[in-house]
Image (cartoon, grey):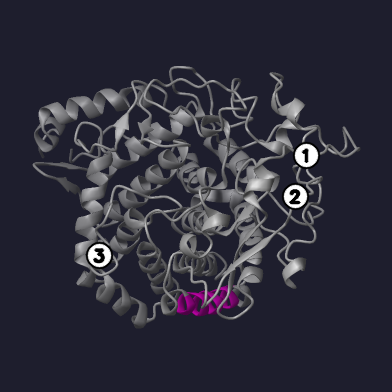
Amino acid sequence: MASPAKAMGAAAAAAMLLLLSTAAVAQAQHNYGDALHKSILFFEGQRSGRLPPDQRVRWRRDSALNDGAAAGVDLTGGYYDAGDNVKFGFPMAFTTTLMSWGLIDFGKNFGSHGGEARAAVRWATDYLMKATATPNTVYVQVGDAFRDHSCWERPEDMDTPRTVYKVDPQHPGSDVAAETAAALAAGSIVFRDADPAYSKRLLDRAISVFEFADKYRGAYSSSLYSAVCPCYCDYDGYQDELLWGAAWLHKASRQRVYRDYIKKNEVALGASDSINEFGWDNKHAGINILISKEVLMGKDSFFKSFRVNADNFICTLLPGISNHPQIEYSPGGLLFKVGNSNMQHVTSLSFLLLAYANYASHANARVPCGGSSASPVVLRRVAKRQVDYILGDNPLRMSYMVGYGERFPRRIHHRGSSLPSVSAHPARIGCKAGAAYYGSSAPNPNLLVGAVVGGPSNTSDNFPDARAVFQQSEPTTYINAPLLGLLAYFSAHPNLPQSDGTD
């Protein structure tokens, strides 16, 4: 077989091997199982509502127990998205979909952590079932973001308005509704064996929510602009979410109607648009990777164009091959995209690399990139390099996961973590009284174990560890969600081969 230099081009191979060489040196040094456990534990720190007896993040207490009451509905539960106290439905649904995808593709690698990972998914799906209990309606947010962000207070103390926002036929939100349908469909696969009755309820609800999303088309940021923007504005349109929702319903239900919907709407809904993007707002790359599995497994050649799109996307991520203007790598090896909270791109894009590597590996396929190609092993090494960077293999020798390693962020932008716990300070800390803690240079008193922060914001590999720099110091659920599958896989396969014999 051809050597790496011949298969990939000499310059491309040299650049890729240089970037991945530090990962090779550091192989097997990380405890990926411990990092997985902590990444799941993070979600317990983000819980809203009445906490269960087995709650392990003990500095948290019950919060937001009247959510939804003003609208006559029960919207307790779910997750706070980041370091604030608002429940945003759009990123929560995406978080749920990605946690579920990790369990679906890498479930056997979770080992003893499978149960706690499913519990993290169920905390979200239980809430999404409440949010979709009214036909042709999805409750998409609880809390006034502007009022909430003007305060620095614990979720247990918050007294800002818990305003309820919804999408319905008169105020459409195809994006958030279709993402919610995707989350419920993906969740139904997760619980198919563990709880068949619950799985069926999730799938039935996903079907009805998707019908609503498709029938009443429109972006939720048009219907609810003043409430959801700029925090979680839909900048990329709702079309990708409709394809994404249909793809998950096809996977969960195996009903031909969704297969036909995807093919019929492939061009109209822009399957090949912005294929280098994947996150809570843009699903294009994820759509193509997810659907390509059907092609690579030989189950459906009907979707060949999606594999072409997926191959093109993967090539934009490979160092030494990619010359995409929106993808860079820092001197320390971190994948970087312009914008806030870079780690959300690192974890989500790395997850797609790993998922596609597994699909291609089962099909004994390579990824063609112009005049070169890459094997599944190369894709896995690129993904692992990003995970290792997060866990401490970087110029600062700093883990970006709270509680993992000897050095990690101590002043994260997170209200509950930075304020004294209720047990340590039983008296209420008011909206403005928390400012003293926000401005303090002292480490946070409560460790939000497992939280991964936004990380370096440019290609210099620098990190200030300062609460005020929220773009770098704030954790989010959608940073951690794709990391679960990555850590599960590498906990089972900590030492990757340097070659698969075909490079």
- Residue 345 in magenta? no
Q: Where residue 135 sits in the image (x, y, percent)? A: 59, 81
- The answer to which of marks 3 and 1 sits earlier in the sequence is 3
| Residue at image location 31% in from the left, 64% down from the top | 291
Classify residue 283 as left or right of residue 137: left
Foreground label between 3 and 2? 2
Q: Where residue 86 sits in the image (x, y, percent)? A: 65, 51
Secondary structure under the numbered disc 1 in the rendered image:
loop
Classify residue 26 as left or right of residue 310: right
| Residue at image location 64% in from the left, 40% down from the top | 83
**Front-most of 168 and 300?**
168
What span is colored magenta in the figure? 199-212
Label 2 to label 1: alpha-carbon separation: 8 Å
CB-based contact (under 8 Å), mark 3 and mark 2: no
Q: Disc 1 marks which residue? A: 431
**Front-most of 495 and 464?**
464
Label 3 to label 2: alpha-carbon separation: 50 Å
Q: Please identify the quadrant where the C terminus is shown.
A: top left
Q: Image height check: is 219 above or below 354?
A: below
Name the residue furthest right: 427
Q: Disc 2 marks which residue? A: 160
Label 2, residues with CA under 10 Å away: few <14, some 14-19, many ≥20: some
**Amino acid type, label 2:** Thr
The main secondary structure of the magenta stretch is: helix
CB-based contact (under 8 Å), mark 2 and mark 1: yes
**Amino acid type, label 3:** Val
On the question of residue 23 being in view, the answer is yes
**Front-most of 276 and 34?**
276
* Quadrant in the rendering for residue 260: bottom left
Q: Disc 3 marks which residue? A: 295
Q: Please identify the quadrant where the N terminus is shown.
A: top left
